[in-house]
Image (cartoon, rainbow, N blue to C red):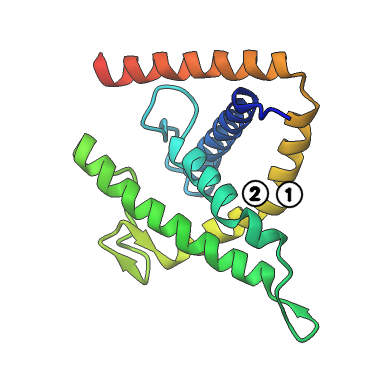
Amino acid sequence: MKADVKGTLARYFLFFVFYSVIGWLYEVFLEVIVYRWGFSNRGVLFGPYCVIYGVGALIMIFALGRLKQTPIRIGRVSITPILVFLGIVVLTTALELLGSYIMELTHGSWQWDYRHYAFNFQGRIALNPSIRFGIGGMVFLYILQPLFEKLANRMPRRTLLLISGALAVLMAIDCLFTFLL
């Protein structure tokens, strides 16, 4: 059976966009509702997405997907979810640190400051947000991703390619608009 590379890439691109939008909504929710700072676009692009969340989601899918399916036990107790949680914390913290350096290099600064949190490193990463990302990552891997996979698998291939292609064009235009104008 011939592998459907286009379909697979389209599915993963769709996941990337879903999680980028969810990340943007999460960031705006924190800013407007929790911290009451008012609205600002939390992404580096014009559109309503934070690409670092989409990248992080794909990294977690590829890096932790098999671990999530592997039953690891100590006696009768499954420790797989604990290992997955720790993996999420490590991966998202490393991605956030890397993202801060990339943003500083490309924009002169990064969009968050954790200096007021305990256990922070240069205000770029901190224990509290890392734990929150761990919890969010568990919701993502155990609840959202299986749901999104079911939805994507039910979509006719042509529809999947059309939607992913349209979103790719929109993001490409956004990137051109953001970085060239």
Identify the image quadrant of the C terminus: top left
Disc 2 secondary structure class: helix
Residue 60: percent from the left, percent from the top?
A: 55, 51
Compared across the picture, whether 1 is left or right of 171 comes to right
Q: Disc 2 marks which residue?
A: 140
Q: Residue at x 33, y 14 (%)?
A: 177
Image marks 2 and 1: residues in contact by CB distance under 8 Å = yes
Rendered view: 22 above or below 65: above
Residue 5: percent from the left, percent from the top?
A: 60, 27
Disc 1 secondary structure class: helix
Residue 165: percent from the left, percent from the top?
A: 56, 15
Rendered view: 142 above or below 50: below
Residue 129, disc: none
Q: Nearer the viewer, residue 28 or 19?
A: 19
At label 2, the amino acid type is: Phe
Rendered view: 100 above or below 28: below
Q: Residue at x 77, y 80 (%)?
A: 77
Q: Residue at x 26, y 48 (%)?
A: 101
Q: Nearer the viewer, residue 129 or 144?
A: 144
At label 1, the amino acid type is: Ile
Residue 65: percent from the left, percent from the top?
A: 63, 53
Q: Residue at x 31, y 56 (%)?
A: 124
Name the quadrant containing residue 122. bottom left
Q: How many marks?
A: 2
Q: Disc 1 marks which residue?
A: 143
